[in-house]
Image (tube, rainbow, N blue to C red):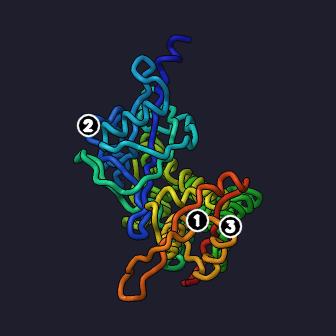
Amino acid sequence: MAKDAVATIINVTAVIVAVTNDVPRVLIIDQNPAHEAHPSPNNDDALPEAGQYALPNGPFEPERHAGLESCLRRWVEAQTGLDLYYVEQLYTFGNRYRDPGEIAGGPRVVSVAYIALTREDAVNEEDARWRDWYSFLPWEDWRPGRPAVIGDKIAPALQRWVKQAQSPSRRKQRQERVNVTFGQSTAPDMDSVLSLERFELLYEAGIVAESIRDRRAAGGTLKSSLDTGMLPEGDGMGIPLASDHRRILATALGRLRGKLAYRPVVFELLSGEFTLLQLQGVAEALSGAKLHKQNFRRLVANADLVEPIGRTSAVGRGRPAELFRFRREVLGEKLTVGLARPIMRSGDLK
C-alpha cells in the first residue's frame, strides 16, 4: 500500500480563459527544465515538440495546501502572477500513461482540472503568456467558415484510419465516430460541444503530435501513423502541449460551449457594461460559430438576460451603441439562464 501511495502524484491544472477583441485566449506557461517535473523522454527533433508549453499546474501537497482550489490559486499566482476570481472544477484526469513521464517509468499523475474565467490582464512572469485558444485546436473555429485543415488534412487522414480497420464491423464503428464528431463529408456543420470527442478521435488515429510523442515513449513502431503518412505535415494541426493538456483544453471548451445554453458564463468574460455587439462577439468566440445578429438579439431579449443602463458608447464611425448590463436578478427567477447551444456552420450567418 505504501508503495502505491508514493507512486501517484496529485496535480492541479488551470484552464484560464479570457476573450479579448473577440479572440478567445488561454493562459499557458513555457516549461523549462527548472520547473518541469517529468521531462518528456522524447528527444527526437524530427517530431513536433509536445512538452514545451503547458497549462498552469503544480502538485498538491497536503502539508502545505488547505484544499485543491487553494492549491490551484497558489500555483497560478506563482506561475502567472494572476489572482483568479471565477473558478469551477472541470474534471479529474487519471488515465494510466496520460503523462509521458509515467510511460518512462515515473509516477502516475492524476490531475484535477479547473476552469477560470477572467479578463485578459498582463502577466508578471516571463514564462507565462496568453495565446489564441484556437491555435491549439484549429479545427474548432468555424467563424470564418469550415476550417481548411479539416478538408486538407483531417478528413483524408481519418479516411485512411477507417480503411485500416481489420474487419468490416470495426470499419463501420470508426466511420460512425468520424460522422458523429466531424460530420459526414458533405455535412455543412458539426456539433460544437463535442470538442473532447474530436480530440480523442484525432489522438487515437495518430493525427496529433501528442499521440506520436506517447507512442515513441512507449517504444511503439508508429506504423499506424508516421509510416502510413497519417500525421499531417507542417503546423496546421495546432500547437502541442505537455502531458494531455490539449485534451484538458478540449474538455474545457466543450464544457463552456455546453454551458452557454443554461448558465450565463459568457458574462464573466465581459466588463460590467457592454454593447450587444460585444456580447455577441464573446458568444461567438467561445462557440467557434457565427451567430445571426437579429436572432441572437431576439434570444437575449426573450431570455431577459440584460437591461439598458441609459448610456451609449461610440463604436467605430457608426452611431453610438447602447450599453447594457447583465441582470443578475435573473439567476433567482429562472432555472435555466443562457443562450442557445451553438452549432458550427459553414458560411457567414451574420
**Residue on which disc 1 sits:** 158
Decide which of 9, 274 is in the foreground and name it.
274
SS at mark 3?
Answer: helix
Residue at 31 percent across and 40 percent down: it is 79
Q: Nearer the viewer, mark 1 or mark 3?
A: 3
Q: Is residue 348 above or below residue 166?
A: below
Name which of mark 1 and mark 3 comes first in the sequence.
1
| Amino acid on which the number 2 mark rests in the picture | Pro
> Residue 187: where, in percent of width, then height?
66, 77
| Amino acid on which the number 3 mark rests in the picture | Ala
Name which of mark 2 and mark 3 comes first in the sequence.
2
Decide which of 286, 293 is in the foreground and name it.
293
Residue at 40 percent across and 38 percent down: it is 57
| Amino acid on which the number 1 mark rests in the picture | Leu
**Residue on which disc 3 sits:** 303
Decide which of 274, 147 is in the foreground and name it.
274
Residue at 24 percent across and 46 percent down: it is 124
Decide which of 281, 130 is in the foreground and name it.
281
Q: Using the numbered discs, state the Cα–Cα distance from disc 1 to disc 2 in whole angstroms.
A: 35 Å
**Residue on which disc 2 sits:** 33
Q: Is residue 199 above or below residue 306?
A: above
Instruction: Tell me if 248 is positioned left or right of 344 in this view.
Output: left
SS at mark 2?
Answer: helix
